[in-house]
Image (cartoon, grey):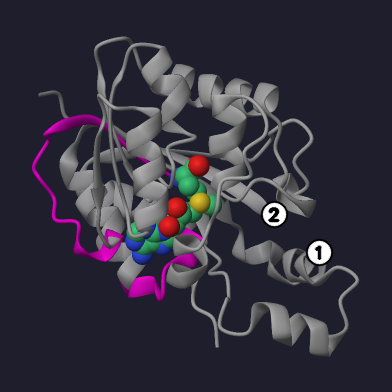
Amino acid sequence: MADWKSVWSRRQAAGAGSPLQALIDLDGFDSGAGRIREAAWRAYVTEIAGRLGMHAGDSVLEIGCGSGAFLFPLREAGLRVAGLDYSPTLVAAARAAMPDGDFREAEAGEFAAAPRSVDFVVANSVFHYFPDDAYADRVLAAMLGTADRAVAVLELPELDCRDDAEAARRGLLSDREYEAKYAGLAHRYFRRESFSSAARRHGFDAEMFGQSIDGYAQNAFRFNCLLRRISPA
Ligand SMILES: C[S@@+](CC[C@H](N)C(=O)[O-])C[C@H]1O[C@@H](n2cnc3c(N)ncnc32)[C@H](O)[C@@H]1O
């Protein structure tokens, strides 16, 4: 049976396209319902950065950064970027794309909070690969402890949409084809309330909104969560 870590560790560069499109593709947004083009990706990252108030010189850490597709436009905008991911191949690609970034091969679940040491901590399209809710809660708590200003947990599958999302994922596959392709590769689904209650416990405000990346077929099933620290430094 497959597992997500081996899936992500086997990703290979397709080779074609711009440097950023190559990272987007490597990070899994390259086929079917998950496909995202560079212009739409840039607009998405720019929108999130604007909502969070990110500026040149700020620091950002991504948990589950993959090859760094989300960080790449932020670095172009002058932010200092860092990331961790459990896929050695994707971490190597991030280092090659952003040699001045600080990239580590690590399990998100082993990430320990370094209190208020980074301006922003983000995770784009990562939490649904986590093994269970306790793991996700632990990672979120470490992100909230580490961020001096805000946390963004993005591309979260919405629990209320699970049946529709799974039907879309199943697509035209027969039961046998689906089982062969996805055995052991379940996605987790989340309630908005679990993020707003974690935010309250840690002294953050929560803003949630549905996903809207141009041309992205998963928009209807995903939400974003921005958590801003209430207490000043
Ligand atoms: C869909 S990709 C997104 C990559 C990147 N965040 C982006 O937006 O382009 C999901 C990433 O999460 C990473 N990942 C999933 N579970 C993880 C875990 N438990 N610890 C570390 N990385 C994980 C995978 O290796 C992969 O790079």
Label 1 sits on a secondary structure element that is: helix
Whole-percent x, y for residue 6 in the image: 46, 71
Residue that carries the numbered disc 1 in the rendered image = 168
Mark 1 or 2 closer to N-term? 1
User: Which is nearer the eye, 27 or 129?
Assistant: 27
Residues tagged 1 and 2 counted as in contact (Cβ below 8 A)? yes
Whole-percent x, y for residue 142 in the image: 20, 53
- The quadrant of the rendered image in which ligand 1 is seen is bottom left
The residue that appears at 64% across and 40% down in the rendered structure is: 211
User: Which is nearer the eye, 10 or 210?
Assistant: 10
Dividing the image into 4 quarters, which one contains the C terminus?
A: top left
Residue 117 drawn above or below residue 26? above
The residue that appears at 25% across and 58% down in the rendered structure is: 106
Label 2 sits on a secondary structure element that is: helix
Q: How dense is the environment of label 2, judged by Cα within 10 Å: few (below 14), some, or many (20 and up)?
A: many
Whole-percent x, y for residue 84 in the image: 29, 48
Stretch in magenta: 108-134
Residue 4 drawn above or below residue 152? below
Residue that carries the numbered disc 2 in the rendered image = 221
